[in-house]
Amino acid sequence: MDILELQNEIILNLQQIQENNPLIHNITNYVTVNDCANVLLAIGASPIMADDEDEVEEITQIANALVINLGTLNKRTISSMLLSGKKANELGIPVILDPVGVGVSTLRNNAVKDLFEQVKFNVIRGNLSELSYIAGYDTKAKGVDVSQKDQSIDASIVVHKVANMYHCVAAITGAIDVISDGTSIIRLANGHPMLSKITGTGCMTTALIGGYLGASKNPLVSTVAGILTMSIAGEIAYKKYGEVGTGSFHVGIVDAISKIDKQILCERWKIIM
């Protein structure tokens, strides 16, 4: 896929999500659950947040995509994630993983191990420390953030390795976002540093990928589209609200996502292939 074809597919994917209103099942964390729901609504998808094991399989089977986020992990939701993931695989529903904080605790590490053993993921999106841990590096994550030590790791090598290990699209978001399907490497240069100053932008990005993927079933295109949407929204929100403060900037991100269209994407995207 060359850059022009990718750009055309992104525009088509945006049209698909706005026309088809895909239902996205989120098993996500309670810090950012409201933000994830709002960005999905803003882009044109329909979110449902269900994490009780007595209903997750039923919810998953009517969804167009499943997003699993480890942000506020507990033993109860691990069971729900496994049940939902296996049901999605059984029905051919795409599954997206956000391995928040993996490498930080034994609980998270074991949960990710179990998920990889039992569930096939179409997309894995995280920060450099998280995906480096999955790739087998000795990482030193700072809570849910990238540590200074891990910043020396080559993100392009990590995403290529993870994509091939798990036969998926792997993405690392940061100052420069890096995405691989195991063959090609795509870099995105949009965004603003203020995105790192509010909680949940990574979780929201993963939710957006789920929204796009629920409409298109093209993991590479949908991953690029979801990341671009958040990054460009951050640029727009900063221009309008950056001097006001992080609270207004936070709300401005959702405003900007709700206005994303073909013209805004074409004027702003910075895709490097």
Image (cartoon, rainbow, N blue to C red):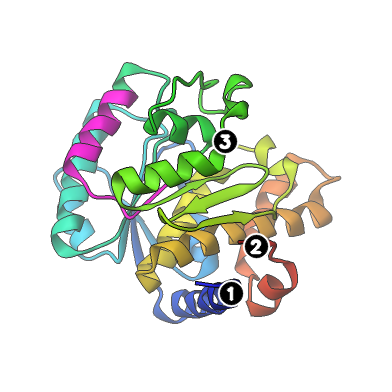
Q: Which residues are magenta?
A: 108-125
Sequence order check, earlier mark of 3 and 2: 3
Q: Earlier in the sequence, mark 3 or mark 1?
A: 1
Q: Amino acid at mark 1?
A: Gln
Residue 172 disc label: none
Q: Give the structural element (helix, strand or loop) at label 1.
A: helix
Which residue was labeled with disc 2? Answer: 271
Rendered view: 101 above or below 228: above
Q: On the rendered structure, is 118 left or right of 132?
A: left
Percent coordinates x, y for residue 114 in the rendering: 21, 33
**Residue 117 drawn in magenta:** yes
From the viewer's perspective, is 80 left or right of 168? Answer: left
Residue at the spot of label 1: 7
Nearer to me, 1 or 11: 1
Q: CA distance from mark 3 to mark 1?
A: 26 Å
Q: Nearer the viewer, mark 3 or mark 2?
A: 3
Residue 56's spot in the image, x, y percent? Answer: 20, 50
Label 3: how many Cα within 10 Å (few below 14, some 14–19, many 20+): few
Asked if residue 219 can be seen in this view, the reply is: yes
Residue 81 position by quadrant: top left
Residue at numbered disc 3: 154
**C-alpha separation, residue under disc 3 versus residue under disc 2:** 19 Å
The amino acid type of the residue labelled 2 equals: Ile
As measured in the structure, the alpha-carbon distance from the residue carrying label 2 to the one carrying label 1 is 9 Å
